[in-house]
Image (cartoon, helix red, strand yellow):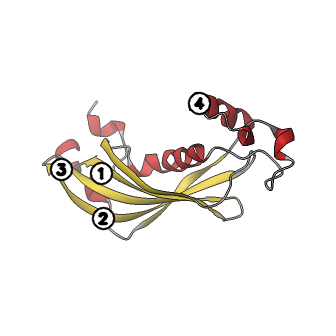
Amino acid sequence: MKISQLTGRTNYFESFEVGSVIRHARGKTLEPIESVLLCNMAMNSAAVHFDEHLCRSTPFKRRVNFGGITVALVIGLASQDTSENALQEISLTGVRLKASVYNGDTVYAYTEVLAKEDGGREDAGIVTFKHWGLNQDETLVVECERRVLLKRLSHWGDR
């Protein structure tokens, strides 16, 4: 099996055009067990993520998901289209959590290609993406910029 058969054919460096926007195919509904598990794994013990009783007395009125989960979820939803052929994650900047995400909310991811540049090696280039996530009500919940070193089809694909 050739290495190019392990990934999609439309997510190499050459595949991306500056200004193009991708609506990623899948959404993901956040379950309470995921929130608790991921908070525990990240050592985030803030009561607003765990204590339903306490949260009733806050402006939120219910538990709020950890923002790190929201960021990771949007990048994960975008990964099949944007980084399946990644060689290196370079940076994640400008993370802005715009609205709270709650248990039972569904998040959808979108990506805009902001820039492409030489990667300092002939087999790869760098793409800068802007990712954002909307909830089921189309409320913007998160946005960030991400730079990824991606394989070039000309070097990694079938010849």
Q: Nearer the viewer, mark 2 or mark 4?
A: 4
Q: Nearer the viewer, mark 4 or mark 3?
A: 4
Disc 2: which residue: 115
Query: For numbered disc 4, what is the local secondary structure?
Result: loop
Between 83 and 157, the one lying in front of the other is 83
Residue 88 is marked as none
Q: Position of residue 154 (x, y in %)?
A: 18, 50
Amino acid type, label 3: Ser
Residues tagged 1 and 4 counted as in contact (Cβ below 8 A): no
Residue underneath mark 1: 12
Give, as a three-letter code, the residue at label 4: Met
Give the answer, above or below, for where 38 lies relative to 73: above
Q: Which residue is mark 4?
A: 43
Quadrant location, the N terminus: top left
Circle 2 or circle 1, nearest the eye: 2
Q: Quick check: marks 2 and 1 in contact, CB under 8 Å?
A: no
Q: Earlier in the sequence, mark 4 or mark 3?
A: 4
Q: Name the secondary structure under disc 2.
A: strand
**In percent of the image, x 83 and y 41: which residue is there?**
54
Q: Position of residue 62 (x, y in %)?
A: 81, 47
What is the number of the mark on residue 154? Answer: 3
Picture residue at 45% right of the left edge, 46% below the top: 80
